[in-house]
Amino acid sequence: MSSIAEIEQAIAKLSTREFIELERWLAAERNRKWDQQIEADSASGALDPLLREVEEDVAKGRTRPTDELCDNS
């Protein structure tokens, strides 16, 4: 495996087109890893306290529709 410095040097040599392709790939890879982390946290129960908190907020009427929070003007 290349070192970070070697990877940085290689990136600096990319053409504009190649750099854009790399950016797209990195964004997709970041999203894929994020999805994996969310799935793992969900499966392990790590998100259960947050889910209970949300359910409690909904039950107690402490929520608002999302469109009230967005500026749709």
Image (cartoon, rainbow, N blue to C red):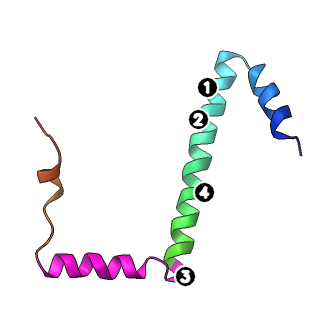
How far separated are the C-alphas under marks 2 and 3? 30 Å
Q: Residue at x 53, y 60 (%)?
A: 35
Residue 48 position within the rendered picture, expressed as x and y whole percent measured from the top left: 41, 82
Q: Which residue is mark 2?
A: 24
Q: Secondary structure at mark 4?
A: helix
Crowd rating for badge 2 (residues with CA inside 10 Å; few <14, some 14–19, many 20+): few
In the image, residue 21 lies at what x, y percent?
64, 29
Residue type marked 2: Arg
In this rendered view, identify the residue nearer to me: 44 or 60: 60
The residue identified by callout 1 is: 20
Query: Mark 1–mark 2 contact, CB under 8 Å?
Result: yes
Residue 11 spot, x, y in % from top left: 75, 27
Q: Earlier in the sequence, mark 2 or mark 3?
A: 2
Which-is-in-front pick, marks 3 and 1?
A: 3
The residues bearing labels 4 and 2 have C-alpha atoms spaced at a distance of 14 Å
Helix or strand or loop: what does disc 2 sit on? helix
Label 1 crowd (10 A; few <14 / some 14-19 / many >=20): few
Q: Position of residue 15 (x, y in %)?
A: 71, 16
Mark seen at residue 45: none
For the residues labelled 3 and 1, the Cα–Cα distance comes to: 36 Å
The residue shown at (39%, 81%) is 49
Q: Earlier in the sequence, mark 3 or mark 1?
A: 1
User: Image height check: is 10 above or below 65?
Assistant: above
